[in-house]
Image (cartoon, rainbow, N blue to C red):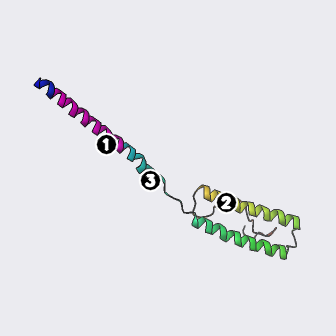
């Protein structure tokens, strides 16, 4: 009978130790994803990109207003409207690209010489 009680006591203690080990192991596994989540949750600061965009937007809007007030002699109003719309789309596309790539600056324009007057070869 004494051996029986010893076996029962050892069995109960082993069971309790196993349960305690499993509980602490599960708790450790729950903490693991939280640690990974913290390294993934780094925030991108879009401030420099936003500032560059707003700077170019205000410059372009001012230039467009000036071009409307003093039209170019070698460009019709329809040509001007189309060119300005293309410049606007280009800036918006560059801004979207910058945001998608988490850039600090606006990507360069794909348009060659979009600020030049027609026939101006000063950049070539």
**What segment carries the magenta color?**
6-28
| Mark drawn on residue 39 | 3
- Mark positioned earlier in the residue sequence (3 or 2): 3
Q: How far across and down, in percent of the image, does residue 29 sit?
A: 37, 43
Q: Residue furthest front?
A: 1
Q: Alpha carbon of mark 2 to alpha carbon of mark 1: how far?
A: 51 Å
Image-quadrant location for residue 98: bottom right
Report the residue marked by disc 1.
24
Secondary structure, mark 3, is helix
Residue 67: x %, y % from top left: 81, 73
Secondary structure at badge 2 equals: helix
Residue on which the image places disc 2: 94
Q: Is residue 95 above or below residue 65?
A: above
Q: Residues within 10 Å of mark 1 (few under 14, many from 20)?
A: few
Prevailing secondary structure class for the magenta stretch in the rendered image: helix
- Decide: few, some or many residues near mark 3? Use Cα within 10 Å; few <14, some 14-19, many ≥20: few
Q: Is residue 38 magenta?
A: no
N-term-proximal mark, 1 vs 3: 1
């Amino acid at each position: 009978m004494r051996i029986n009680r010893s076996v029962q006591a050892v069995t109960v203690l082993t069971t309790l130790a196993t349960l305690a080990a499993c509980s602490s192991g599960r708790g450790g596994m729950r903490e693991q994803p939280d640690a990974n989540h913290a390294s993934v949750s780094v925030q991108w600061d879009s401030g420099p990109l936003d500032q560059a965009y707003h700077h170019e937007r205000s410059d372009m809007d001012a230039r467009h207003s000036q071009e409307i007030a003093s039209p170019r002699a070698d460009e019709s109003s329809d040509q001007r409207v189309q060119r300005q719309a293309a410049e606007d789309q280009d800036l918006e596309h560059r801004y979207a690209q910058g945001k998608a790539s988490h850039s600090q600056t606006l990507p360069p324009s794909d348009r060659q010489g979009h600020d030049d007057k027609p026939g101006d070869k000063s950049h070539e």
